Image (tube, rainbow, N blue to C red):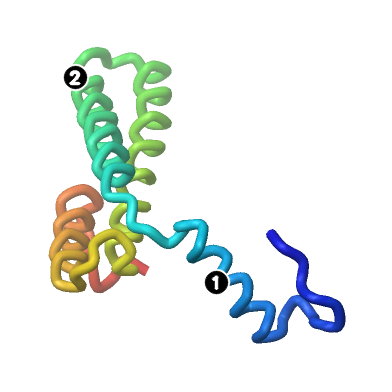
Amino acid sequence: MSQPPDGHAYFSTDYYEMLCAEVQAKGLFKRTYWYYAIHGVVALLGMGASLYTLSLSDSAIFQGLNAIVFAFFSVQVGMIGHDFSHKEICRSEVVNRYLSVLVWGLSAGMSESRWF
């Protein structure tokens, strides 16, 4: 991150505008569809594998470890739903809203309007 010019504080609007222009020039605000697609598929496969693992054993220790795995992947899906709810993934607000309802409803079992 570049330093603010002499005489400017870190919280000044001039520094913010300069920083925002630098971040945009580096392409850090570009949408990363492939990242979310791969992340979503891996998270859903992890949740599915964990649910399948429930049927393999009735050992409390084994299922306790499986619960940790399921929690990890369900948080990953929740973060994708969070990004959809903030309209960060797709350009279209309608598509973001539809997919956020789908992610929250099917994976977390909750309403998108109550995700926060």
Q: In the figure, is residue 9 to the left or right of 42?
A: right
Q: Residue at x 85, y 77 (%)?
A: 6
Q: Which residue is situated farthest in the right direction here?
A: 7
Of marks 1 and 2, which one's residue comes earlier in the chain? 1
Residue sticking out furthest to the front: 25
On screen, residue 70 versus residue 52, left or right, reads right
Residue 45 sits in quarter: top left
- The relative height of residue 51 versus residue 116 in the rendered view (above or below) is above
Question: What is the three-letter code of the residue carrying label 2?
Answer: Ser
In the rendered image, the vertical position of residue 75 relative to residue 88, given as above or below: above
Q: Indicate whether 88 appears above or below 70.
A: below
Q: Position of residue 51 (x, y in %)?
A: 22, 29
Quadrant that contains the C terminus: bottom left
Residue displayed at 25% across by 52% down:
108
Instruction: Return the residue at label 2.
Output: 55
- In terms of secondary structure, where does tag 2 sit? loop
Proximity of marks 1 and 2: CB atoms separated by less than 8 Å: no
Number of marks present in the image shown: 2
Q: CA distance from mark 1 to mark 2?
A: 53 Å
- The reply, left or right, for residue 59 in relation to residue 111 is right
Q: Is residue 62 left or right of residue 14?
A: left
Image-quadrant location for residue 3? bottom right
Instruction: Check disc 1 and report its element: helix, strand or loop.
Output: helix
Label 1 is placed on what type of residue?
Ala
Residue for badge 1 = 21
The percent coordinates of residue 90 (x first, y second) are 24, 62
Residue at 29% across / 59% down in the picture? 89
Q: Quadrant of the N terminus?
A: bottom right
